[in-house]
Image: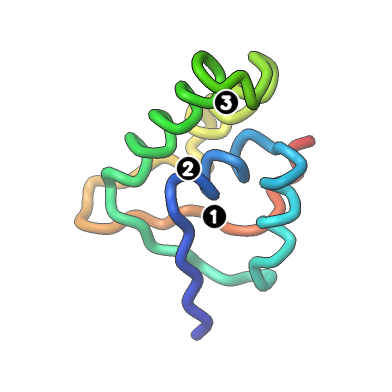
Amino acid sequence: MTAVVIDASAGAEIVAGTRRGRALAGLVPVGVGGWVPEHFYAEVLAVLRRQLLVEKLITEAQATVALDGFGRGSCAAPRSHHSSMPLGPTGTT
């Protein structure tokens, strides 16, 4: 099994569908599963907030795409010590 480690900054880029996020997602092998601790999602949301409000690195549309991904359950954390996060291209642009 291939192990892939993604930090919150990379996760935020991927779910926001930024150019950097699409490039990072393209580096993840197809079909690989990922495991992250539940607090990963809080960290990703904090990164998205900072990128939107402070650094102005993402647009409101990109933030909405990222939050929609969480709402659809594609990045929702089950109640366990670890949760799976789909890795790789999600089809968002």
What x and y, as percent, mark residue 62?
A: 67, 24
Residue type at numbered disc 3: Asp
What x and y, as percent, mark residue 89?
A: 71, 53
Residue type at numbered disc 2: Cys
User: Residue at horizontal 51%, vertical 67%?
Assistant: 33
Q: Which residue is mark 3?
A: 68
Query: The C terminus is located in which quarter?
Result: top right
What x and y, as percent, mark residue 74?
A: 53, 42
Q: Which residue is mark 1?
A: 86
Looking at the image, residue 86 lies above or below residue 79? below
User: Residue at horizontal 71%, vertical 37%?
Assistant: 18
Residue contact at pointers 1 and 2, CB within 8 angstroms? yes
Looking at the image, residue 5 lies above or below residue 64? below
Query: Could you tell me which secondary element the residue under label 1 belongs to?
Result: loop
Q: CA distance from mark 2 to mark 3?
A: 10 Å
Residue type at numbered disc 1: Pro
Q: CA distance from mark 1 to mark 2?
A: 7 Å
User: Residue at horizontal 46%, vertical 22%?
Assistant: 49
Pick whichever of labels 3 and 1 is earlier in the sequence. 3
Instruction: Give me the disc on residue 78.
Output: none
Residue contact at pointers 3 and 1, CB within 8 angstroms? no
Q: Which image quarter: residue 64?
A: top right
Q: CA distance from mark 3 to mark 1?
A: 14 Å
Q: How many marks?
A: 3
Q: Which residue is mark 2?
A: 75
User: Quick one: label 2, few (<14), some, or many (20+) residues within 10 Å?
Assistant: some
